[in-house]
Amino acid sequence: MDPERVLRRYLELNEEEQKKLIDGVLEIILSSPNADLVPDEVGWSISNKFRSGELHSLDGFKLLLEAANSCEPMKLKKFLEEVK
Amino acid sequence: MFSFELVPNSPLWKLEIIGSIAEEVGVDGIWLSEHPDNRSSILTACHLLKIFPRLWIGIGVLNPYMFHPLTIAQVAATLSEIAPRRVYIGIGAGDRTSLEKAGIRRSHPLKKVEECVKIVREILEKGSYQDEEIHLRLNFRPRSKVPIYIGAQGGRMLRLAGKIGDGVLVNHTNPALLEFAVNEVRTGVEEANRRIDKLDLVAYLTISMGEDESKALKAAAPYSAYIICGAGREFIERLGMDPKVVEDIRRILRIGDWIRLYQVLPPDYIKATTFIGGVEELKELVARLFKLGYTQIVFGSPFGPRILKALKMIGEVIKYFEEDINRE
């Protein structure tokens, strides 16, 4: 996974597509039994952004990518490939 | 009334996110399960009570083998200071498998639970308790009433719950067992000359929702295994399960061999102990439970193989019944 390419792709999407992408990565994290592998500071930041309605943003997406890459790298890779 | 069950086996930040979704879909509260190998349900409750000022939090359940009644009373009184009128305490005999892991034998569960409830209630109501062994006076006052719910599965515990509980957490998902449970609780209520409408009768369901049944079954399998292994002979016989298979499941669970569990646990057993299905099937189950007299439905973990999607599906069910109530 090339993070810069993923972020570039994110910025090319329209708002609805961005939301769908973010929800997809969030689903991977919430459904993972390995959430303990996510660094705590990343997890807390995701929760804070989710609860304040700021997760649907470039910063939120970056955090989600880091978290999903920590707990479900293969699922994240497959999901991002499907998005392409 | 609707609530969610969260299992503190996930990091607190993840419970915050799921709790936030729970609030959004319209639940009134969250029950936290207690297992010695997970995060502390008590400390998780402290945290979530501060995060969600509109939700009540219940701890379901603390058992008197691992938690002395005085500790439970102290916890309940302290939580009532953090969040007056938003704290429920569940007391039950505890999960047999978890207790075994802790080297504790679950002896005389009925007597232990009854004694525990008596002590906790008296301390919360009067601020003190005294018997031949215990002499305790709290140095602070509980800030509100803390309802005591009894966690129950078997007939005798359900009848006891009907006699002494402010509420009953009926730990079944199978409709036939939930019907059996209502009748047992009613018997207990009548024996104690109480009224059933004074009791919060709670169906504590284990839910796995999704479009792909095989994935929903897989997500529910560990939960089903814990339910089966924690259940008494009465329950195993009632569901027509093979005791040899149950013994196998128990052995596998003890060593935590999840791959083997998926091979050994029959899908029929998972379906008999958990809810597997979609929105319409869940609406049917909830309607049936309200008709039977249940007053609270707990949508419990694992929710489904895709949690976010499953929570949205549960949200649809809640919305349907809320609109139904508004129409009436």
Image (cartoon, rainbow, N blue to C red):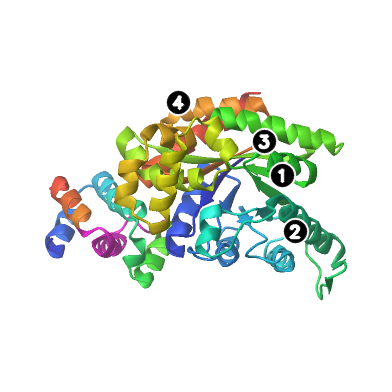
Mark 3 = which residue?
A: B295
- Residue that numbered label 1 is attached to: B167
Q: Residue at x 48, y 37 (%)?
A: B273
Which callout, 2 or 1, points at the residue further toward the start of the chain? 2
Nearer to us: label 2 or label 1? 2
Tell me which chain the residue with mark 3 is part of. Answer: B
Closer to viewer: mark 1 or mark 3: 1
Q: Amino acid at mark 1?
A: Gly
Look at 60% across and 32% down and name the residue there: B178
Marks 1/4: CA–CA distance: 28 Å
Q: Residue furthest bottom?
A: B139
What main secondary structure does the magenta stretch of the protein show? helix
Q: Is residue B161 above or below residue B276?
A: below
Residue B213, position as x, y percentages in the image: 33, 33
Query: For the residue labelled by badge 1, is the local secondary structure a helix, a strand or a loop?
Result: strand
Please state the horizontal and vertical placement of residue B285, each as a whole percent of the image. 53, 28
Q: Secondary structure at mark 4?
A: helix
Label 4 vs label 2, nearer the camera: 2
Q: Earlier in the sequence, mark 1 or mark 3?
A: 1
In the image, the segment drawn in magenta is A51-73
Mark 3 or mark 4, which has the lower sequence index?
4
Label 1 with label 3: CB-CB less than 8 Å: no
Please name the residue shown 73% across and 44% down the image: B161
Q: Residue at x 83, y 71 (%)?
A: B134
Name which quarter of the figure residue B297 lies in: top right
Relative to B88, does residue B245 appear above or below in the rendering? above
Tell me the kind of residue under disc 2: Cys
Judge if badges 3 and 2 mark residues of a common chain: yes
Location of mark 2 (residue): B116
